[in-house]
Image (tube, helix red, strand yellow):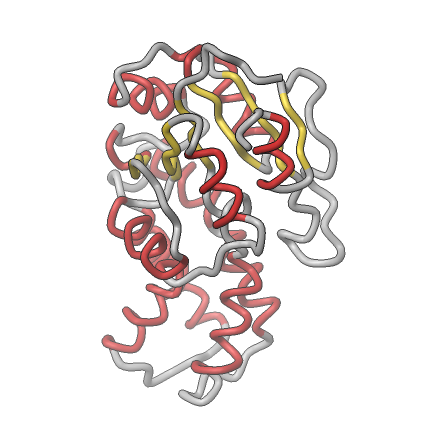
Amino acid sequence: MEFPEVRAFTFDIFGTVVDWRGSIIREGRKVWAAKGIDVDWEEFADSWRGGYEPAMQRVRRGELPWMNIDSLHRLILDGLLARYRVNGLAEEDRDQLNRVWHRLDPWPDVADGLKLIRRRAIVAALSNGNVALLVNMAKHGGLCWDCVLSAELAKHYKPDPEVYQTAAALLGLEPHQVMMVAAHNGDLMGAQAVGFRTAFVRRPREYGSSQTSDLVPDSTVDVVAEDFIELADLLGCR
């Protein structure tokens, strides 16, 4: 399972590398509740993330101009604050709250697993998150990327093929020399469609204890691992 032709591993970020839901809930309860945002933070986090795909579809249909993920997150946030009747929040606070996505914490296995995989090949973020967001998140979480690649560079969103094709081209590699690592079958199928190899890492609590999606990998993925440490072992990185 060592895949000698693979020279780079690209990693999905939200849910695969970082615990977006838990991070937003923790910061919401610790910081933003004290600033007057009295909401059910579990529900708020789920609703914020739930607006993500519909917002991207609006861009794809031409209803909205191209926006990076910071801008889409802000668009969704403003709608949520209105829905939850959160009034009087200063613009500076709205911006700071929106940047919670820059401060997401990695899953416990990620930092050590990345270091192991990096011994063998290039490790790169490949996310719909914009470059500034991904760089700040890496600094916050101590993530040792060789390269930060973003859908922003292709002006498309995953799983559009242009995102994966642009990533491979920027790395100077053919698609079959890149392995996409994700906890989401849709992302892996998008990468596979342009020739990437694929690795599924289970994140059964990304959406909390009642998660129903992406619990089982698609039968066509190349590697299945419980976490990044096991992935490194399966890839012969020790």
The residue closer to the viewer here, 109 or 89, is 109
- Left-right relation of 81 to 220: left
Residue 111, relative to residue 24: is it above or below?
above
Give the residue displayed 48% in from the left and 60% down from the top: 105
Which residue: 49% across, 12% down? 4
Q: Is residue 152 above or below residue 48?
A: above
Q: Is residue 229 left or right of residue 122?
A: right
Q: Is residue 65 above or below residue 49?
A: above
Q: Position of residue 182 (x, y in %)?
A: 54, 34
How many numbered marks have been drawn onto this rendered protein structure? 0
Residue 195: x, y in percent?
46, 11
Foreground pick, 20 / 37: 20
Closest to the observer, 170 or 194: 170
Point out the residue furthest to the front here.
238
Residue 75: where, in percent of width, then height? 34, 57
Please identify the quadrant where the N terminus is shown. top right
Quadrant housing the C terminus: top right
- Report x, y in % for residue 124: 36, 34
- The vertical placement of 165 against 186, above or below, is above
Q: Which of the 4 quarters of the picture holds residue 2?
A: top right
Q: Give the residue drawn at x 41%, y 45%.
A: 55
Q: Quadrant of residue 154?
A: top left
